[in-house]
Amino acid sequence: MTALKIRIALFVLAAGLVLGCGKSGEEAAKNDTNSSALSAPEFIVTSYTGEETYSLDGYKGKVLILDFWATWCGPCKREIPHFNQLYAKYKDEGLEILGVSLDEQGPGAVERFVASIPIDYGNAMANREVVTAYGPISAIPTTFVIDRKGRVQRRFVGYQDVSVFEEVLQQLL
């Protein structure tokens, strides 16, 4: 019986060492470079006004922040001013930002939202194809950073401070 307890204790200790030695979430987010970046899936989405269409092809040669969000999502709302700030700062250097709304209430919800909280960059409504191509989108915001060659360099799930995006953009612009 004592030998069994010792084996269990050693197993728990070994598992703790293996699991405890990994990077923290913040460290992993900062240090995760994507040297084998995958090509970003093509997409075509329509603006919430129905007046514009956006496609990956339209962003060739640009760095694109592709942000899946919703009007009812608190963390998404907190990121919008940061994205406005980044867009103003880096648009002349080749940054584009596209928000893709997952609002099930449709374009009217986004239109009302944008009337009260300005968004300075493009915004579109999600469709099944873009969600499937970039999914699974299991939480929002989910944000992709796509380089000038159309490769996904980073994927973030959940709210990220503006400094996280600044660091990535410094490498890509």
Image (tube, rainbow, N blue to C red):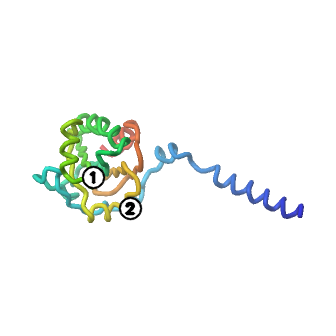
* Amino acid type, callout 1: Asp
Q: Residue at x 28, y 34 (%)?
A: 85
Q: Viewed as shown, does residue 140 lie left or right of 120?
A: right
Identify the secondary structure beneath mark 1. loop
Q: Quadrant of residue 15?
A: bottom right
N-terminal-most mark, 1 or 2? 1
Q: Quadrant of the C terminus?
A: top left
* Residue denoted by label 1: 103
Q: Residue at x 35, y 45 (%)?
A: 73
Q: Residues within 10 Å of mark 1 (few under 14, many from 20)?
A: some
Q: Residue furthest right?
A: 2
Q: Residue at x 32, y 57 (%)?
A: 151
Q: Quadrant of residue 95?
A: top left
> Residue 18, image x and y in percent?
66, 55
Q: Quadrant of the N terminus?
A: bottom right
* Amino acid type, callout 2: Pro
Identify the secondary structure beneath mark 2. loop
Q: Are marks 1 and 2 in contact (CB under 8 Å)?
A: no
Q: Viewed as shown, does residue 129 lie left or right of 161?
A: left
Q: Which mark is residue 136?
A: 2
> Residue 29, image x and y in percent?
47, 46
Q: Residues within 10 Å of mark 2 (few under 14, many from 20)?
A: few
Q: Viewed as shown, does residue 123 lie left or right of 147?
A: left
> Residue 76, image x and y in percent?
34, 43
Query: In this picture, is 154 found above or below 80?
Result: below
Query: In this picture, is 24 found above or below 46?
Result: above
Of tags 1 and 2, the one toward the viewer is 1
Q: Estimate the spatial distance between the alpha carbons at disc 1 and disc 2, rounded to whole Å.
A: 16 Å
